[in-house]
Structure formats: C-alpha cells, structure tokens
Amino acid sequence: MESHKMSRKNRRLLIISCVITFFIVVYFGCGITGICRVYKISTSACEPKYEVGERIFSSNLKTIQKGEFVCYTHLSGEVYTSQLIAMEGDVLEIKNNIAYINGSLDDDTMKLKFAWIVEDPEGMDMATFFAKYPGRDFSANPDGKGGNLINLTINEGQTMGYKRWCFEKGVSDKSVWMGAQNNWNRDWFGPFTIPKGYVFLLSPNRANAYDSRYRGPIEMKNIVAVNLN
C-alpha cells in the first residue's frame, strides 16, 4: 500500500517536472528563434509610446509594415527599438521636426515628444534644473541659449505655456547623417529617397532619439522583430 502511494506521488512529480521542462524549452526556443522575445526599454527615445524600463514583446513572424515599432541591430550588435516611418522608394522629408512621406504629413503629432524651452530668469544650472523637474526627460540646448530644454508632448508643452524649440532650416549638423553635406539637422532633414533594401526609422521622442537621422537608413536584414505591444 505504501509502495502504491509513493509511486503515485512520483508520477505526480514526474508530470510536474515534464510540464516545467516543456515551458522552459518553449521559452528558450522562442527566444533563440525570435518567434517571441522580450526586450527592456533602456532610453526615453520611444516616449510617449514606451517608457524607460518598460518590457516589450516582439516577434519575427509579424509582417514588417510602415508605422510599426521594430527591433533592429546596428554596428555594435546591440538591439534597439524605433518606429519604421518610411520604406524603400518613399521620399522622406522632416520639416520643423515633423515627418512628411511622399509629400504628405505622416506623423500623428499628438503622439510625439518635442523640445520645449523652459525660461528661467535666475539662470538655473542643470543640477538645479533637474532637481526642480524630477523625473522629466531633458535634452541639451544645441545653440547654448534660450533656456533649458524639456521634452514634452504638445498637450503638456502648451498646458505649461512653454515655447517649442527647433533648429533653424539650413543650419547643418555634422552629427546628423549627411548633415554637413546637405545643411540638414535633426529638425530639417531631406528630402531623401529611401534606397532599395532599406527603411528609415524615426523615434517619437524627436529631441532625444538616436535614430536614422543619425545612423542613416537601416537595412531590412537588420530588422530582427516587430513589437507586439
């Protein structure tokens, strides 16, 4: 009788072990094949869509389409997340930090973050500025004047009474891809035709994102997955 009870217990343990093993194999199998992977957002580049520290699910089975947030690899081999804004053959132009594709407005500006000037009559240093606005997303003021910059959505910036900051058109930025040759900057870029086999990635946090404006167009083969959430 005792032996019968033990064997039943052992069978139960065996079943539990098999189930656990099955899920472990599925989990690592999905990760290795790319069917389903989990990535952690480490920067504010995709705000307000994704917050820093948020975990996203992605898959290489989902069809890559314009407007999707995708995961891609670059020269360092690391995986980054950004929004696919233009496909091969599309003509991209960024005007006043807003994207136009083939001559038409492509952005939903209410879902973007821009740089806004925070005027301060006392001339706060950056440490004091950060302390006054804890948890906020900031960007450096490239021209060194006009107050500090805080990155907000249009609703937030207008509610606070701030003025949006942008580069002037025709001011070249050598850190921008082909910026020096074409007098482009992050806010005024193109027109540029996306070459065959490439896509253009542009993150929603326009003042604080290292995307195709800086890296150039990304090869399709470097898109490893499409985000699911």
Image (cartoon, helix red, strand yellow):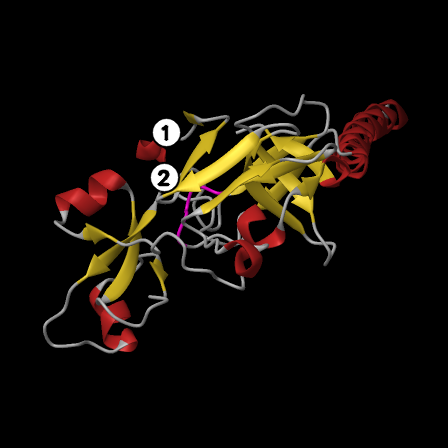
Looking at the rendered structure, the kind of residue marked 2 is Leu
The amino acid sitting under disc 1 is: Asp
Start-end of magenta stretch:
203-207
Instruction: Tell me the residue at 83%/29% (across/down).
Output: 18
- Quarter of the view holding residue 64: top right
Image coordinates for residue 60, horizontal then vertical, percent: 72, 29
In the image, 73: left or right of 98?
A: right
Q: Is residue 57 left or right of residue 20?
A: left
Q: Quadrant of the N terminus?
A: top right
Report which residue position mark 1 lands on: 108
Q: How many marks?
A: 2
Q: Main secondary structure of the magenta part?
A: loop
In the picture of the structure, the residue carrying the numbered disc 2 is: 112
Q: Residue at x 53, y 64 (%)?
A: 174
Q: Are marks 2 and 1 in contact (CB under 8 Å)?
A: yes
Q: Which mark is residue 146?
A: none
The residue nearer to you, when weighing 97 against 32, is: 97
Which is nearer the eye, 226 or 58? 226
| Coordinates of residue 119 in the picture (x, y in percent) | 15, 64
Relative to 78, is 39 above or below? Answer: above
Crowding near pointer 1: few (<14 within 10 Å), some, many (20+)? few
Secondary-structure class at tag 1: loop
Image coordinates for residue 39, horizontal then vertical, percent: 61, 44
